[in-house]
Amino acid sequence: MENEEILENNELTLDELQAKEMKEKTKFQKILDHVTCFLPIIVGFIAILEYKLVPNVPEFYNPKPNTYITFLLILMGIFFSLYVVSLFLKRKSFFNTVLHKAPLTAAVFAFLILYDCLTLKSNYLLYPFFPWFNDILNAMIGDAAFLLECSLNTLKLLFYGYFSGVLVGLITGIICGYSKKAEYWVDPLIKILGPIPTATWIPLIMVIASTLFKGCVFIVALGVWFAVTTATMTGIKSIDKAYFEAAQNMGCDSKQLIFKIAIPAAVPNIFQGMTQGMSSACVALMVAEMIGVESGLGWYIVWAKAWANYSKMYASIIIICIIFTVVTQTLAFIRRRVLRWQEGLVR
Amino acid sequence: MAAIELKLDHVSKSFAKKESKSVINVLQDINASFHENEFISIVGTSGCGKSTLLRLVAGFINPTEGKIIMNGEEVTKTEPNRGMVFQKPTLFPWLTVGQNIAFSLKAQGIYKENAERVDEMLELIGLADFKDEFPARLSGGMAQRVALARTIINQPDVLLLDEPLSALDAFTRMNMQDEVLAIWKLRKQLVLMVTHDVDEAIYMGTKVVVMDKNPGRISKIIPIELDYPRDRTSKQFVDYRIEILNTLHFGNK
Ligand SMILES: Nc1ncnc2c1ncn2[C@@H]1O[C@H](COP(=O)(O)OP(=O)(O)OP(=O)(O)O)[C@@H](O)[C@H]1O
Ligand SMILES: [Mg+2]
């Protein structure tokens, strides 16, 4: 039988298999790999030297000059420790990841060098619209408490809005995917409201909603609801009827058909809707904060700009960037985890 | 095995054809009676209503006229006691092999007291090492074996097989024929198996039902009086083949 053959293969470990299938690397290539891993460290040191040795534009006042250096050292430290850890791990895949990310990390340092040259060292990008990085970092640290509060507000809005949107979207999506009658009533609503960017409603909602917070949650949830509803609906409608028949034949009642077949089969679509909903939520949230709500990072940006404090503005943009990246990546991670069964099915 | 009687009593089935607003008579006046410990092979040209017949017995659809009676009770809906294995394996891709096999026990709420049956099934189909794999990782033959296990774990009195082996290559197919026969001999239930392959029908069946089309009907039921395991090259085997091919209008007489 087929499985005996596979059993024999199983005696190899995954690493051995990969090593067998890959061409043996030459000594030169191996050395090159390690040199590549050191690239970020080298470029990082160049960045420090550049910052220290090249004279600043004389008029610029640069208090607490060492923040930037500390920042660079921390980044380099993180990368270096990952590299060292990867040398001691038995699994080669971690080293490969480090190796893979090395040129990119080096490029980040190179960009920081370039940016420093264009701002602090030459004022080629005009101050105060383009503050140098040390200034941004200092602004971030100086206003840390307030930025944290704003971040928490943003996160709170995002989560309330996002999850209520997902929850309601799932319910309507499942009902409409299942029942022709429900679809009859909800579909036109989606067709008309769907294409309108949710931000359009902000001015109206700000007036109607009892509190700004609720209004903002609603705005965020609306776009998410739309994305999740349509995706879930399509997902459920496109399920192979054979799955339902097989399940019924195996003793499922109609409630079980929903929870054991319809929903799991639609999960890939649901995640697609959730990912799409997340990006629309981020957009809606920023716009809502900038226009109406008097808290959160979006509001902070407008506020900092009004005071012409561009360093603070960049600080909050960077934080927004980090938050949204982390949130999106977490979602993608969960998605990969849940959809493990698709491996080998798609691609 | 307790006595089983499956009776098809003047069963006809028509479908509405939406495009031409007409009605198509797929099956007309099917009469037959099958019992436990019988392995019924059903052959017939494409479109003669073989799948429709199985779907009627499974209870996915109801006859337009006539009745299907199982142990004295009319068949009106599908249930695990008449287990169906589809031509496509239709394993649930989001469940592992083990979970797929356990699915029906869980759906009926009898998993806890029967959990060991899942492992027995995995042993039976020789896929114990694949319990935690997802179906996407299985070969066609393995998937079809899991589909079979998933249905027979319910110990159905009637096992309905709709061309379960047609997607397999010739060697896997011959292995699987013996495996299915072994499963049938274990519990001596009633098996109805649709196939396109006349050799397979003779090799496996205690009876071969030959169907004709337009409208679909049973043209002949041929009992195969050969001992298992059957020799595909024996004189009697070849004679049966000629008889069936003639009934299907493919003979050279
Ligand atoms: N749900 C349906 N609605 C309308 N027509 C149908 C339906 N199911 C089957 N038919 C028609 O019934 C006829 C017989 O179909 P069936 O699938 O039973 O044939 P079959 O003998 O299994 O053919 P094959 O050997 O190709 O699988 C076909 O003409 C098909 O178009
Ligand atoms: Mg068919």
Image (cartoon, rainbow, N blue to C red):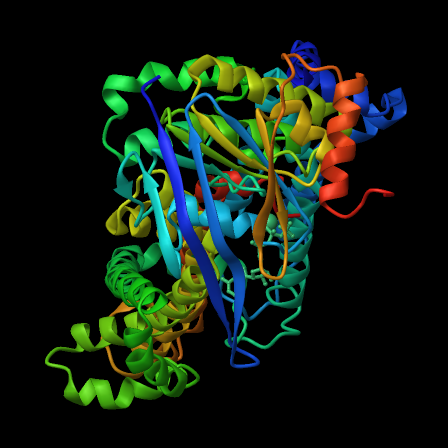
The location of residue A295, given as percent across then percent down, is 24, 71
| Residue at x 64%, y 64% (from the top left corner) | A121
Judge left or right: residue A144 versus residue A208: right
Question: If the image is split into quadrants, where does the N terminus of chain B sit?
Answer: top left
The vertical placement of A105 against B159, above or below, is below
Is residue A330 visible in this depiction of the protein? no
Judge left or right: residue A206 versus residue A142: left
Of A112 and A184, the residue lying toward us: A184
The location of residue B25, given as percent across then percent down, is 53, 65
Judge left or right: residue A9 versus residue A218: right
Of A149 and B251, the residue lying toward us: B251
Is residue A220 visible in this depiction of the protein? yes
Of A143 and B208, the residue lying toward us: B208
Q: Residue furthest left?
A: A210
Which image quarter has ligand 1? bottom right
Q: Quadrant of residue B166?
A: top right
The vertical placement of B167 against B183, above or below, is below
The location of residue A81, given as percent across then percent down, is 56, 27
The location of residue B80, given as percent across then percent down, is 34, 35
Of A55 and B247, the residue lying toward us: B247
| Residue at x 68%, y 45% (from the top left corner) | A106
